[in-house]
Amino acid sequence: MSNQSKIIAFPVNHHSDFSVLSQQNHELLPPQSVTLKKVDSDSGEQDRKRYQYSYGSVGANFNAAKPHYSLGKALAKKGEWEKAISSYRKALEIDSEAAEIYQSLGDALVKNGELDEAVIVYHKAIELQPNLWEVQHNLGDIWQGQGRLDEAVVAYRLAIELNPDFCWSHNNLGDVLIKQEKWEEAVDGYRSATKLNPDFHWSYYNLGEALVELERWEEAVVAYRCAIQLKSDLPCVYEKLGDALRNYSPLSAKEAISYYSQAIQDNPNNIKLYHKALEVNPKDPKLYLGLGNALIKQGQRDGAIVFYQMGLQLKPDDAEIFLQLWKAMLQINDGFEDGGVQSQADLIDFCGEQKVHNKSSQIPLSFKFSPVSKSTVDRVDIILCVHNAFEDVKECLTSIRRHTKVEYRLLIVDDGSQPETRDFLKSWVQEDSVATLFRNETARGYTKAANIGLRASKGDYMILLNSDTIVTPGWLEKLIECATSRKDIGIVGPLSNCASWQSIPEIFDKNGGWMINNIPEGYSLEMFSNIVANVSEKAFPCVSFVNGFCYMIKRAVIDAIGRLDEESFPYGYGEENDFSIRARKAGFKLAIADHAYVYHSKSKSFGHERRQELSKQGSAAFKSKHPDINVKALTEEIKNNQALDRLRLKLREHIVPQRNQ
């Protein structure tokens, strides 16, 4: 998370004459403005103590300069800074050794925007009287505003050493330390500030920010709650509290939802908030409705339709979701006028049934939606190519059935499997209404089998899924979310334990080979996939290649470039790289759904030596077909992808490091 998103950037107040600031609303002042107000708010008492504590005895020269000095103070109270500066300068012509005159001149110069000269004048005041803590504090404010952070830290620390009871020096020191990403020290600064002044909301808020960076979730929850008690409309504070609760404990999920709901109420068009809430509570149809509405407002109609559909799956009798889905589908004007008319008729029937239901609530009604309405919603076909490996296939199919909530069709292509796997697939299809089985009596190779599925597909999205994978909760929704995030994205893949550049948390093993990451000890596959979703930035990074183990293709790509090249890559091992390059040349982007996770057991269809042989053949075929492609440069590009690197780093911090295989 960037520094800019982790700290509220307040404008540095360039003045410390507080008779003027005292007329402002304390609630609206940023920390440094409040600081300066506090320094001079009791100016009479402060002056008396200053003479005794800071300046010592008053000499004859000061008495002679006092009329000009007093005039300067009066002009400063009126905000006439140029005249005040002139009066202070005249006073210094008479008494050039009076530290308090230099301090007041410095304050006026700051007010007038003459910061560089103010620094010089402040240094002269400190030279004459080293224990001027207010001057050190004001120097800290100036240097923080100028980005001279190291100097600001020194100044604030000196101010605290001279006067440890001034809360704003601690608070502003914390601000600088957060900018320097010195989280532990920032926590200490804010804690000191809150002890001295427990009524300032920003100290608690930024304390929470630093604690989040340290992943001290329980303490962050406490800090954000204190901030909310003092001021409930701080930026994104309910979202931040929800995030902290969600990370703190699974038992806090329900409470996190309440804060996400408040954040959504404050900002109903923030798509990110809906996704966070759905990760905690994926069975709330209102969230799908709100997310769909937000996507519509941002011009993402296709994505909105998907989430409206998901909401209706949870609550088929929700008239509002149905209405919004219908409105979204009416915007599709590519020859589907009949579908729009039919959808309108369905809506009339639906509303009529709803009225009957309201009149007689004892009569349960089933609400039917027309096939035309469904056909205009993005359709997904999962294509599963199988060649033996019975146990893997069984586990893969079970995970698809358990974790796929979006409407889909399953196209199984059995490429000459032995009787055990063949018979299992036959029985599975008989019991699964969404599944269709295609069979080659003898194995023809992966690419030809995949093309059988692609030819049979009528979907808007086709997913080539290896039969040695295990999908996780929300996998398909996340792939669709990534695919619909940009119109030019044509191919999408998830993260995995073993998928070359898409592997997490490690890419390579200790010998430089591809890492086969184990699920960390103590985690289930579902738990680990949730961690991936939680730490993901949802950056959806565009990449050079997408691994073929789970390969989502938009219909538009097939229409533009055709299917897989089964002549050059008959047994796989390079066919997806060829397809990726062809798609890129046609203007499509390839993206990683960096919040989706699909486990890859690694192929058992062939032995190790056979896989090595096929891999070499595929590599040679690719180079022959694409001599213009600098594969090394493209792999370096994806290897150094910053979004994926950040995600891997966060994952390593979440889990116990595992030994390289």
Image (cartoon, rainbow, N blue to C red):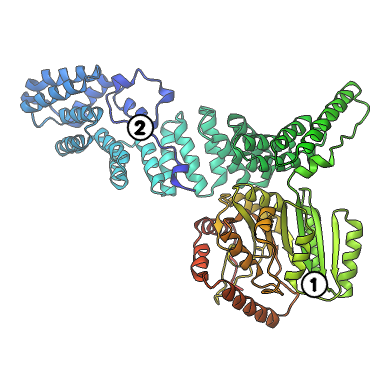
Q: Mark 1: which secondary structure?
A: loop
Where on the picture, by quarter, is residue 310? top right
Mark 2 residue crowding within 10 angstroms, few (<14) / some (14–19) / many (20+):
many
Image x and y of residue 522, in percent = 68, 60
Where on the picture, by quarter, is residue 272? top right
Disc 2 residue type (three-letter): Gln
Question: What's the residue at 77%, 35% (across, down)?
Answer: 340
Along the polypeptide, which appears first: circle 1 or circle 2?
A: 2
Q: Quadrant of the C terminus?
A: bottom right
Q: Residues under labels 1 and 2: Cα distance?
A: 68 Å
In the displayed structure image, the side of residue 466 where residue 134 appears, left or right: left
Image x and y of residue 3, in percent = 44, 46
Q: Between residue 345 and residue 641, name the one nearer to us.
A: 345
Q: Give the labeled residue for mark 1.
A: 387
Image x and y of residue 26, in percent = 41, 23
Q: Mark 2: which secondary structure?
A: helix
The relative height of residue 31 versus residue 496 in the rendered view (above or below) is above
Mark 1 residue crowding within 10 angstroms, few (<14) / some (14–19) / many (20+):
many
In the displayed structure image, the side of residue 503 where residue 331 appears, left or right: right
Q: Does the rendering let one see residue 456?
A: yes
The relative height of residue 147 versus residue 346 in the rendered view (above or below) is below
Spot the residue most to the right: 363
Question: What's the residue at 30%, 22% (across, down)?
Answer: 18
Q: Does the rendering let one see residue 472?
A: no
Disc 1 residue type (three-letter): His
Q: Between residue 414 and residue 398, name the one nearer to us.
A: 414
In the displayed structure image, the side of residue 573 where residue 424 appears, left or right: right
Q: Give the labeled residue for mark 2.
A: 32
Image x and y of residue 551, in percent = 68, 60
Q: Which mark is residue 72?
A: none
